[in-house]
Image: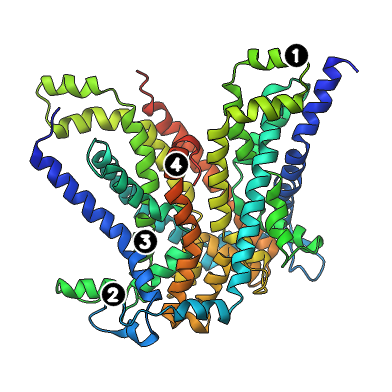
Amino acid sequence: MNYRKRNMIAGYLFIAPNLLSILIFVAGPVLAGLILSFMKWDLLSPPVWTGLTNYSTMLTDDNLFWKSLWNSLYYSILTIPVGIAVSLILAVLVNRQMRGINFFKSMLFLPVVSSITAIALVWKWLYNPEFGILNYLLELVRLPALDWLNDPRLAMPSIALMSIWKGMGYNMVILLAGLKGIPRQLYEAASIDGASGWRSFRDITIPLLAPALFFVFVTSTIGALQVFGEIYVMTDGGPANATMVFNYHLYQNAFIWFKMGYASALGYFLFLVILLLTLVQLRFMGKKVNYDL
Amino acid sequence: MRESQTTRALIFGVLTLISISTLIPFLWMLSTSLKENYAVFAYPPEWIPRPVTIEAYFKIFTMIPFGKQLLNSIIVSVSVTLGQLIFCSLAAFSFSRIEYPGRDTIFVLYLATLMVPGYVTLIPGYVLMTWLHWVNTLNALIIPRLFGAAYGTFLLRQFFMTIPFELQDAATIDGCGHLRIYGQIMLPLIKPALATLGLFTFMGTWNDFFWPLIVTNSEEVKTLIVALATLSRSYFSTDWPTMMAGATVSLLPMLVLFGFAQKYFVEGVVLTGIK
């Protein structure tokens, strides 16, 4: 057996388990999902080809579709800008030599490694209107108690607050790596020229951190549009559909009402939205964020 | 740019406050889990339970098969992690170190699957599980992930690429086959990457929720995380000490693992960008 042939056999044998698994459990389902999205199927009776019906139902005949799309967008607006700002402040604060700094970083990272379902359960308890610790703290500073998760206006902001708390350590670490990549001489030079701390931050840190900020922005957007576990544990989409996010609507269609075809169409719609958003973000921001030094 | 003593003290203060706010939910969870049922209604809330009791922990392990569920979580997370390490590294080695026709085309397919979010494959995946009669078995939780995902392969490939080819050529001349080069030369050189991939796979599998939720329904087969989530929507949802005991048990393995491997977690985030 010659060398090339041996290489080829070895090469394919090495990737075979991995490749087959990806074909069966990822690539196959992706195609099957697309086909399913043109069908009506409740898993019991045979599937029926319905063409674009699912997609037209989505756009014209399902109030919850628009509601859930808006809710996911609302959740993104609530969590992303504030979340990134908080992470940036934290990254700047921990980017120094100081006693206990590693301890602080570890504490901030604890929520990141924790499961969202356990965290959501704990926060549901914190948010308890009668015996929750948050209302107690509000009372201590003489503020009125809130009905956090049961108030349709407050439910989404409450979930957003928890998500920011959970995710800040993750983005902090990424931004911190970006900060460490900025050459110190730039700050020293700015300082000699008489630039204030704020000026240095605005004109050196922010522009040079743009690639990291951009990365955090894109991944946060993708993550925010897929929120699910916290809704399952905390609100079940309520009250009055105030927290009915896109994926929760999809989940209900598929696994409560067994509308497999319709739910597949919902999945593909979100997939397309995320793909488009990512491409737009890459196109508009990608150009502006490259400062090679 | 030197900071004044005051600035540094101020920063230290702010960081202390933020760390406390990070810890409060965890401490409150632990405190509640050690309380008698009536004590959670005390006003003002008590941080130190009086009396301290571990009744809630007994309750969660007897009310539902929490021990079995803990075991399920361990079996699933450990086997998926080991499987990913083995099969992703094998594939990554092949993609970066062996030359053969078709290799790069297949790799492009891998890159394409990276862009597919989990919920797109959720429904067909579920249908596939029903066809295989794997719904409500551990097979559904383990086998689809056991042989590795595109991400792990992609990540390890990046690391294999940094190793000079001379090393491999020398081994080949000495008569080493691919399997030996992979196992005895290459794998030891990418240990940090393997550690990172292993930790993040373990974390992702342990904390995974959407997929295990839909493919399991009997208590005996659920993972800890799913059991906890469904319990939180049941009749027992207002039994806060028991709920918090469950949450504590489900968080403990990750928190302990994090305590031991902080460095890999924190550096891993930067390395991988995995959540």
Q: Residue furthest bottom?
A: B38
Residue indicated by mark 2:
B48
Please, what secondary structure does the residue beneath circle 2 have? loop
Residue indicated by mark 4:
A218
Which chain letter matches label 1?
A: B
Which dot, 3 or 1, sits closer to the camera? 1
Please, what secondary structure does the residue beneath circle 3 have? helix
Residue indicated by mark 3:
A162
Left or right: A104, with A236 as reference point: left
Query: Closest to the observer: B227 or B36?
Result: B36
Mark 4 and mark 1: Cα distance apart in space: 48 Å
Image position of A291 with respect to A217: above or below: above
Circle 1 crowding by C-alpha within 10 Å: few under 14, some 14–19, many from 20: few
Circle 3 crowding by C-alpha within 10 Å: few under 14, some 14–19, many from 20: some
The disc at residue B174 is: 1
Where residue A141 sits, quadrant-wise, is bottom left
Query: Closest to the observer: B42 or B134?
Result: B42
Residue positioned 34% across, 51% down in the render: A108
Circle 2 crowding by C-alpha within 10 Å: few under 14, some 14–19, many from 20: some
Q: Quadrant of the C terminus of chain A?
A: top left
Q: Quadrant of the N terminus of chain A?
A: top right
Same subunit, labels 4 and 2: the answer reads no
Q: Earlier in the sequence, mark 1 or mark 2?
A: 2
Which chain letter matches label 4?
A: A
Q: Mark 2 belongs to which amino acid?
A: Ile
Image position of B104 with respect to A137: above or below: above
Mark 1 and mark 2: Cα distance apart in space: 67 Å
Which dot, 4 or 3, sits closer to the camera? 3
